[in-house]
Amino acid sequence: MNNKIIKTLVLLFALSGTIHAQNQYIDANLGGGLHSLQFDPKIGDHSLGWGGRIGISYSYFFNEHWGAGAGLGLAYYQSKCTMNGLDPSLECDTVNDNENYLLKSYYSGWKERQEMLVCELPIGGYYQTSINNGWDFVGGAGFVLQLPVWSKYEVTGGSIKTEGYYLDQHLLVTDLPHHGFGTDEKRYEDRMETNIGIGVFAEAGARYWVKDNLALYGGLYGSYELTDAVDGHNPKLHDANGNYHGTLASNQVGKVSLASFGIKLGVTFLIEKQKRH
């Protein structure tokens, strides 16, 4: 699906050079609101995060109302989760004759924060119409290519208590740190393995022309990623060897999507004009 969407975006952008535009605009804008990594942990709670974006875009209109555009921007996303509960798994003890045992990981107030900085390349269709003297309504929707620039997870609180129950011996091991059983209160942090994503976006707002070629813009925007932002989702969050993999790369979550909704402010420059109503 990703390849088809990318080909469509490239085709739309290529076609733009063959059509004579009625009006052409350059927009510089910044926005902020809910910018969250969306996921559903198995034994925890997810909290939405706040973030923002900054960008520049170019748009051209084929006639009085309809046009297309493309842009470039940076967006910051964050989220938090808190783990409470039991995460059991069947493991094999390679030291003791490959004996099977049940690894019990008890999470107590385990808090993790996730952050991601993304380069965004939106391309879509736009509609504009005059509201009254000096005011225009502008709306648009389309696809956005999301390129991860930087990411990080950080544990900020809580503990993990691990126990091992050996099935054949009916033996519960509770405090044997060198064998991986005990209490872990380390504050882990590391980069996340992220993926290039494809999402959809929509925006709507109004602009007021303070000069013939300069307008102020204010409106709402939203976006949602269709693909998975993070690679993995396979290992146990805190595995039998004491390794911590981060919530989003573990089997605690499935798909992770970048989602945003907020307010956008900016300025619009009219760079070519044939006729504006």
Image (cartoon, helix red, strand yellow):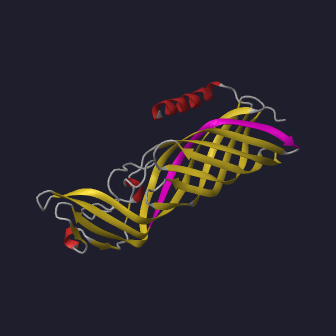
Left or right of 243, for residue 5: right
Residue 166 in the image: state x and y as whole percent.
Answer: 20, 63
Q: Is residue 221 magenta?
A: no
Highlighted range, magenta = 111-132
- The foreground one among 170 and 247 is 170
**Residue at far top of view:** 18
In the displayed structure, does residue 65 sit left or right of residue 163? right
Q: Residue 238 location in percent, x, y?
A: 32, 62
On the image, the x and y values in percent for residue 255 come to: 45, 47
Give 241 or 261, whichever is nearer the viewer. 241
Say whether residue 125 is magenta.
yes
Q: Is residue 228 above or below residue 238?
A: above
Q: Which quadrant holds residue 183? A: bottom left
Residue at horizontal 25%, vertical 70%? 181
Q: Quadrant of the C terminus?
A: top right
Please identify the residue farthest to the left as the structure is shown. Answer: 97
Closer-to-camera residue (101/260): 101
Pick whichever, 232 or 83, lies toward us: 83
Q: Is residue 227 left or right of residue 205?
A: left
Q: Position of residue 22 (x, y in %)?
A: 74, 31
SS majority, magenta: strand
Above or below 273: residue 179 = below
- How many marks on residues? 0
**Left or right of residue 242: residue 256:** right
